[in-house]
Image (cartoon, rainbow, N blue to C red):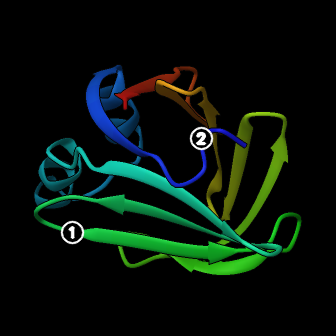
Amino acid sequence: MAFEGKLYVHERDDNFDGFIASLGLPEDKVERLKNYKPNHKLEKNGDTYTMSSLSESRNHIITFKLGEEFDETVVEGRTAKTTFTLDGNTLTQVQKFAEGTITTKREYSSDKLVVTINRSNWDGTATRYYKV
């Protein structure tokens, strides 16, 4: 896959603030998330993937196997039951929480990455754009 190992640099967001507001977090965490604009990299080693979100303030690295549910600790300190699937160049992450589900689709191409985020109990869609 042509996108593996490439560093995608955050470019802009659409409605990401709306998504963050829908989470009902304390104001200090809301501001931290609004300002979190990480670069992104996906790497594969055998049947294991490593997804890295890298920024000056925080690095978040997840290692996973496709189709295998695992416990993921997210930035708010909460735990999700997370599963990744891959269909062509689209990596889908489903995070299940007690209060609902967040679905993140990452659509890779050789020169850009488009991330769409939806969650149960919210009618909106957030989109984050990255370029190589």
Q: Dot 1, how many residues are within 10 Å of its Cα: few (below 14), some (14-19), or many (20+)?
A: few
Mark 2 or 1, which is nearer the eye?
2
Give the side of residue 62 with respect to residue 86, left or right: left
Q: Could you tell me how far apart the alpha carbons at marks 2 and 1 are, in whole angstroms? A: 23 Å
Q: Quadrant of residue 71?
A: bottom right
- Among the two numbered marks 2 and 1 on one chain, the one whose residue lies closer to the N terminus: 2
> What residue did someone put label 1 on?
58
Q: Position of residue 88 (x, y in %)?
A: 84, 34
Q: Quadrant of the N terminus?
A: top right
Give the side of residue 57 with respect to residue 41, left or right: left
Circle 1: element type: loop
Give the side of residue 130 with respect to residue 26, left or right: right
Q: Position of residue 47 (x, y in %)?
A: 83, 73
Q: Residue at x 12, y 49 (%)?
A: 31
Q: Residue at x 37, y 70 (%)?
A: 60
Q: Position of residue 52 (x, y in %)?
A: 44, 63
Looking at the picture, does residue 40 appear above or below residue 114? below
Looking at the picture, does residue 66 appear above or below residue 34? below
Q: Nearer the viewer, residue 56 or 95?
A: 56
Amino acid type, callout 1: Arg
Looking at the picture, does residue 131 appear above or below residue 57? above
Q: Nearer the viewer, residue 75 or 50?
A: 50
Amino acid type, callout 2: Phe
Q: Position of residue 119 (x, y in %)?
A: 60, 39
Q: Residue at x 58, y 77 (%)?
A: 72
Circle 2: element type: loop
Q: Quadrant of the C terminus?
A: top left
Q: Nearer the viewer, residue 10 or 46?
A: 46
Q: Dot 2, how many residues are within 10 Å of its Cα: few (below 14), some (14-19), or many (20+)?
A: some
> What residue did someone put label 2 on?
3
State the mark number for residue 21: none
Q: Quadrant of residue 118?
A: top right
